[in-house]
Image: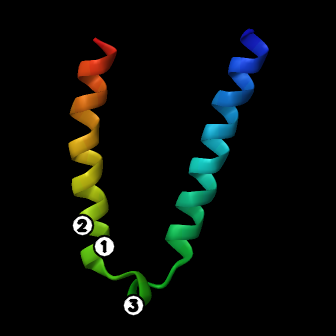
Amino acid sequence: MSIINRRKFFNKISIGAVAAFVLSNIPSKLFGSYKKKDFKNIKVKIHPDSVKRNK
């Protein structure tokens, strides 16, 4: 079971890394600063809920 869990964990990390790499390579003109602000707000909103669930 531990091996399977590790594979899932590393797959999530690799997907996150690829997503971050793609987003960082998108020109700021196409992406826009407004969308970046929205992503930050979404992360802030999701984080407290996940903390409550873990507790």
For badge 1, the amino acid type reads Lys
What distance separates the C-alpha of mark 1 from that of mark 2? 5 Å
> At x 23% / y 45%, what residue is drawn?
44
Residue designated by label 3: 29
Q: Nearer the viewer, residue 10 or 8?
A: 8
- Whether 42 is drawn above or below 53: the answer is below
For badge 3, the amino acid type reads Lys
Task: Tell me if mark 3 has few (under 14), some (14-19) or many (20+) residues whose alpha carbon lies within 10 angstroms of its own.
Answer: few
For badge 2, the amino acid type reads Lys
Secondary structure of the residue carrying tag 1 is helix
Q: Position of residue 8 (x, y in %)?
A: 68, 29
Secondary structure of the residue carrying tag 3 is helix
Q: Is residue 31 left or right of residue 40?
A: right
Residue designated by label 1: 35
Tell me which label, 3 or 2, sits earlier in the chain.
3
Q: Position of residue 6 (x, y in %)?
A: 70, 22
Task: Tell me if mark 1 has few (under 14), some (14-19) or many (20+) residues whose alpha carbon lies within 10 angstroms of its own.
Answer: few
What distance separates the C-alpha of mark 3 from that of mark 2? 14 Å
Q: Are marks 1 and 2 in contact (CB under 8 Å)?
A: yes
- Whether 16 is drawn above or below 21: the answer is above
What distance separates the C-alpha of mark 3 from that of mark 1? 11 Å
Tell me which label, 3 or 1, sits earlier in the chain.
3
- Label number found at residue 37: 2
Q: Position of residue 45 (x, y in %)?
A: 21, 44
Q: Nearer the viewer, residue 21 or 46?
A: 46
